[in-house]
Image: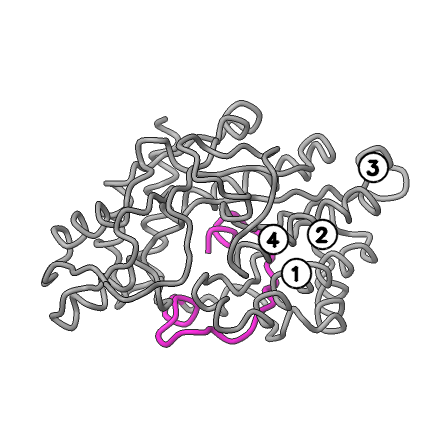
């Protein structure tokens, strides 16, 4: 929707929405783009749509994005997150029109050592669980393709494509209906008049409204298009340190904000391993892209409560406009 408002010609390639309801359907996104239904694990399909669309900018967000699901289906997780990235970059490699690629991975791609300070882009990659590991692999695949086929030293000679990766924090926002996510679970519990059950209450995450990293991706894509190899590297997009809060902190505030919320209770059964402490260092994006977080966590949570599924597109458009105004004001 944001790209459409900016005047872009958009081609989307994806599987059908995985949830009912879905933001894609509620906001009628298909009306403002050429949507091609397909699986990123199918190289021929990916190559066909890239060849037909002849894009100048590619945003790669296709993924199996859930940690707990990755334990249940590691094959799908690795197939989508690793080979999907290979297929996309292969399609780009043989297309002379692409100027910039932004591969969106995750803050969980780092080898998590439970540090109290934020991870920087040059920290070692890793991942305990299949999801985190698969995203670390996606980063390695992207780096290998960049060195082998999109080398900055040969930019403008044998190719004109600049490839970067973007690592965002825990993204929240209206229109998220995925299972096993804290905010959707709180909203669903409130609608049903039940207490929400939370896992890992003391785990710290870099929470941020979805428009924050999206603004970073747009900024990065613009620099890749204009300045090419100078920005073809990894970038963190996260909140300020003060907005890295515990799961229980979020649960307490949201149950105060959401009408009908009945509070929360802590899940006592054994849980799969998830990182306890995770923060991002965003100083590189601040200094080189002039990108800074705009909405603090309290504002982000209030925007989620304000978001209305019955007028999903209008809600999104209004929040995009508000966010742009707030950024312009500094």
Residue 160, how many percent across, how many down?
A: 80, 42
* Label 3 – label 2 distance at C-alpha: 19 Å
The residue singled out by tag 4 in the image is 59
The residue singled out by tag 2 in the image is 141
Relative horizontal placement of residue 90, taking residue 173 as reference (left or right):
right
> Which of label 1 and label 3 is nearer to you?
1
| Disc 1 and disc 2 in contact, CB within 8 angstroms | yes
View extreme (front): residue? 270
Looking at this view, is 55 or 42 the one in front? Answer: 42
Is disc 3 surrounded by few (<14), some (14 to 19) or many (20+) residues within 10 Å?
Answer: some
Q: Residue sitting at 71 percent across and 68 percent down?
A: 46
- Specify which label sits upstream in the sequence, 1 or 2: 1
Is disc 4 surrounded by few (<14), some (14 to 19) or many (20+) residues within 10 Å?
Answer: some
- Specify which label sits upstream in the sequence, 3 or 4: 4
* Label 4 – label 1 distance at C-alpha: 16 Å
* Label 3 – label 4 distance at C-alpha: 20 Å
Q: Which label is found at residue 82?
A: 1
């Amino acid at each position: 929707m944001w790209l459409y408002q900016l005047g872009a010609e958009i081609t989307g390639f994806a599987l059908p929405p995985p949830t009912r309801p879905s933001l894609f359907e509620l906001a009628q996104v298909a009306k403002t783009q050429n949507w091609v239904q397909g699986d990123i694990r199918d190289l021929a399909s990916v190559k066909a749509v890239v060849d037909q669309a002849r894009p100048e900018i590619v945003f790669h967000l296709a993924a199996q994005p859930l940690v707990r699901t990755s334990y249940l289906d590691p094959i799908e997780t690795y197939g989508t997150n690793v080979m999907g990235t290979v297929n996309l970059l292969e399609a780009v490699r043989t297309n002379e029109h692409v100027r910039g690629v932004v591969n969106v991975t995750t803050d969980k791609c780092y080898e998590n050592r439970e540090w109290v300070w934020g991870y920087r882009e040059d920290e070692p990659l890793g991942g305990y669980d299949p999801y985190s590991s698969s995203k670390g692999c996606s980063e390695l695949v992207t780096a290998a393709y960049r060195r082998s086929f999109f080398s900055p030293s040969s930019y403008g000679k044998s190719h004109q494509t600049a490839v970067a990766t973007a690592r965002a924090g825990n993204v929240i926002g209206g229109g998220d209906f995925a299972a096993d996510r804290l905010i959707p679970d709180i909203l669903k519990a409130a609608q049903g008049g039940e207490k929400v059950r939370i896992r890992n209450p003391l785990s710290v995450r870099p929470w941020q409204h979805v428009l924050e990293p999206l603004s970073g991706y747009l900024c990065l894509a613009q620099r890749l298009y204009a300045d090419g190899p100078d920005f073809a590297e990894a970038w963190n997009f996260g909140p300020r340190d003060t907005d890295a809060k515990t799961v229980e902190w979020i649960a307490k505030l949201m149950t105060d904000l959401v009408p009908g919320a009945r509070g929360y209770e802590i899940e006592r059964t054994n849980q799969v391993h998830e990182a306890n402490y995770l923060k991002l260092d965003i100083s590189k994006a601040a200094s080189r892209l002039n990108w800074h977080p705009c909405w603090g966590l309290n504002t982000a949570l209030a925007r989620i409560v304000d978001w209305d599924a019955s007028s999903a597109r209008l809600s999104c458009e209004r929040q995009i406009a508000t966010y742009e105004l707030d950024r312009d004001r500094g």
